[in-house]
Amino acid sequence: MNSDLRTLYPEIEPFETGMLDVGDGHSVYWERCGTKGAKPAVFLHGGPGGAMSPQHRRLFDPKLYDITLFDQRGCGKSTPNASLEANTTWHLVADIERLRERAGVDKWLVFGGSWGSTLALAYAEKHPDRVSELVVRGIYTLTRAELAWYYQFGVSEMFPDKWERFQAPIPEPERGDMMGAYRKRLVGSDRAAQVEAALAWSTWEGETITLLPEPETSDKFGEEDFAVAFARIENHYFVHAGWLEEGQLIREAHRLKGIPGVIVHGRYDMPCPARYAWQLHKAWPEAEFHLIEGAGHAYSEPGILDRLIRATDTFGGKR
């Protein structure tokens, strides 16, 4: 292993936390870490429905940044838990703006990975004047082809053992539309069927996001409370294709022109094929593009983490 690879900053605690009433019956948990009044940044977690973790605070030099992190609607410490009402991409984009106004900043660095990259792109394309820099990892543009690759045919070919477990809760006649079949169970009133489906959906993701098995990454996906919120919200977003027009995020990438950016993607990312990161690179050529060899999807992959920390260091003014 290259000893020059950058790794996470030491553990830190927030200097401020709270719940923000964003309307529609939702309250969003947020926290601020680092140095109050330093360079503003916002971290967008994955999923949808994945929640943030204390590790995410450590992607930024706490001396250089004032970092806002939050649990998106319905997950983590946000309430009501696992709620799908008024929970769409555009609700979350509006929540980011509310948090920016609450932090009292004109613009901020936006950092998102996986679904967080989808949300970061949607936010930056709608509010380019509010984004000082953009760091995105594990690019997902939520096209029909991307969804089918992960939930119908594609990744199934690389992980036939895990795919069999993913199919198990769904009777054979319904397997032609796995997302739809899972939706029936995840929004249904049968709690046992809901939990079984949620655990299978969540575990499929947890076990396919790293190049090699990594229990410390995948284990949380098998926890019942996490899995129910994660699976319900993620499936809800994906069945609706994120309330995005087909191909919208790449088509509107010209709106990112002038925003300094970094795109980081693992060559062997299973959930998010590299071709979409390549498309973003072509549509937004000003951004630095790093396709990491020997890496899967997770930000914890050493080569990916190295590039992410180098990006936040650079944008934070560290040379």
Image (spheres, helix red, strand yellow):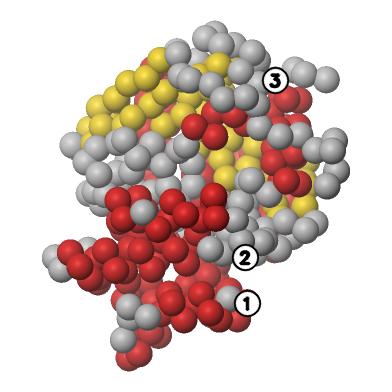
Residue 160 image offset from top left, x and y in percent: 55, 81
- Residue under the image location 21 percent in, 41 percent down: 80
Residue 56 image offset from top left, x and y in percent: 54, 34
Give the camera-side residue of 70 and 248: 70
Is residue 293 visible in the rendered image? The answer is yes
What residue did someone put label 3 on? 316
Label 1 close to label 2 by CB (< 8 Å): yes
Residue 54 image offset from top left, x and y in percent: 49, 32
- The furthest residue to the front: 215
Is residue 125 visible in the rendered image? The answer is no
Q: Mark 1: which amino acid?
A: Met
Label 1 or label 2, whichever comes before in sequence order: 1
Q: Is residue 70 above or below residue 103?
A: below
Give the camera-side residue of 163 and 101: 163
Q: Which mark is residue 44?
A: none
Give the camera-side residue of 315 and 230: 230
Category of crowding for the residue at label 2, using alpha-carbon neighbours closer than 10 angstroms: few (below 14), some (14–19), many (at least 20): many
SS of the residue under disc 2 = loop
- Residue under the image location 40 percent in, 58 percent down: 222
Q: Is residue 187 above or below residue 220?
A: below
What residue did someone put label 2 on? 270
Q: CA distance from mark 3 to mark 2?
A: 31 Å
Q: Is residue 92 left or right of residue 110?
A: left
- Residue under the image location 83 percent in, 20 percent down: 319
Q: CA distance from mark 3 to mark 1?
A: 39 Å
What residue did someone put label 1 on? 158
Q: Is residue 245 above or below residue 130?
A: below
Q: Nearer the viewer, mark 3 or mark 2?
A: 2
Q: Is residue 138 left or right of residue 42?
A: right
